Image: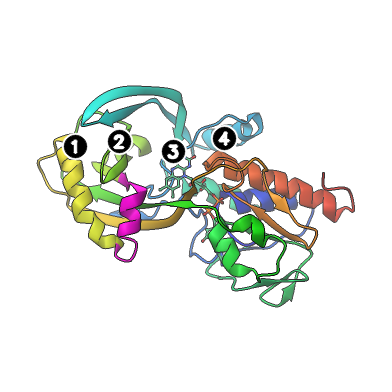
Amino acid sequence: MVGAGLGGVACAVELASAGVPVRVVERAHAVGGRMASPRIEGRPVDLGAAYFTVRDPEFARVVDRWEGAGLARPWTSELAVLTDGQPSGAPGPMRWAAPRGLRSLVAALAEAVPMELEHEVERVGPGPAVDGEAADAVVLAMPDPQARRLLRDDASAVPLLEGREWRSVISVAAGWPRREWPAITAAFVNDHPVLALVADDGDRRGDGAPVLVAHTTSDLARRYDARPQEVVGPVVDALRDLLGVRSVPQWTRAHRWRYAAPVDAREAPFHLGSDGIALAGDGWGSSRVETAWRSGTLLGRALAHRARGEDPG
Ligand SMILES: Cc1cc2nc3c(=O)[nH]c(=O)nc-3n(C[C@H](O)[C@H](O)[C@H](O)COP(=O)(O)OP(=O)(O)OC[C@H]3O[C@@H](n4cnc5c(N)ncnc54)[C@H](O)[C@@H]3O)c2cc1C
């Protein structure tokens, strides 16, 4: 398994529970991928996914367990929409949040599987082999462009990974001296040159910390791709203007997500090639936390069938 985002970890959990030996390698120092919650100023801040929704009954049972363990909580079904600074309501499905950050959910699942962190895979070749080491099957659970880079041009999965556009986002977290903005849990920002979404991280986390996390538009993220720190100024100005905040933040942190989400959804939940190279993650479906879990879980099930010599379906 290459990649310890929710997709890769869910796949590994499914394989391990079917008794199939599995090994997960992740290049980062922690699991979670785009469900990233680094500690900033003493508390976790969700710099990737803002929240998650639950539709699939099987995923709902996983979320029940997270909730029972105090790791996840229903947050809000009312997000605001700000158009020209004017708020309107956007009732929708329940959005779930994690008091210790969304990464903690992936970390809880990952306890059940062997994990190697800070191990970057460079090449997945025929066999299949991971950096020259043979495996029965290899799963690339990551955005398409990251998976493409690992494969030779003649790998059968390559045509599936090319030509699909991915949106970029730069997330900016900002800590303020006090809460000076109107009570919004989170707001989609329409037709804005800088902002696409603003979330109140203290409300989301439940500790009330005066921390906002803003996601830029994809156009702006692409313009600042080579110098993401420089987007902080325009984002802070836009936040102050939009929310009427007079003070300036005490700290800020920017994170660039070059492949935040695919522009178009796919129908298939995963790819399992006859060469033993498989693809999973939120690129397989519509890009969401739940999609990543479902993709990984269904692929894990198919690989377990394959390991038992059954038709993977
Ligand atoms: C800014 C932003 C906002 C979002 N908002 C929401 C939201 O509000 N609600 C929602 O449901 N979803 C949201 N999402 C999407 C959600 O985060 C993803 O759908 C989900 O986390 C994808 O999980 P994944 O396992 O498919 O991929 P990832 O989480 O990207 O995991 C891939 C992993 O592979 C690792 N990796 C890559 N290359 C290598 C290599 N060569 N060797 C080893 N490891 C490697 C990466 O380090 C990473 O950990 C958002 C995403 C972003 C970026």
Give the residue pinned by disc 4.
63
Residue at point 59%, 64% (across, down) = 148
Q: Is residue 68 visible?
A: yes
| Vertical relation: 31 (above or below) 180 | below
Residue to which mark 1 is pinned? 242
Q: What mark, if any, has residue 51 been given in the picture?
A: 3
Location of the C terminus (image quadrant): top right
Q: Nearer the viewer, mark 4 or mark 3?
A: 3
Residue at position x 60%, y 41% in the image = 285
Whichever of callouts 3 and 1 sits on the residue coming sooner in the sequence is: 3
Q: CA distance from mark 3 to mark 1?
A: 22 Å
SS of the residue at dot 4? Answer: helix
Mark 3, secondary structure of its residue:
loop
Q: Amino acid at mark 1?
A: Leu
Residues drawn in magenta: 214-227
Query: Given the current orientation, which residue lies at the most extreme right position?
Result: 309
Q: Mark 2 or 4, which is nearer the eye? A: 2
Q: Quadrant of the N terminus?
A: bottom right
Asked whether, in this view, residue 148 is left or right of residue 53, the answer is right
Q: Amino acid at mark 2?
A: Val
Mark 4–mark 3 Cα distance, whole angstroms, equals 13 Å
- Indicate the amino acid at tag 4: Val
Query: Which secondary structure, mark 2?
Result: strand
Asked whether 217 falls inside the magenta stretch, the response is yes
| Residue under numbered circle 2 | 189
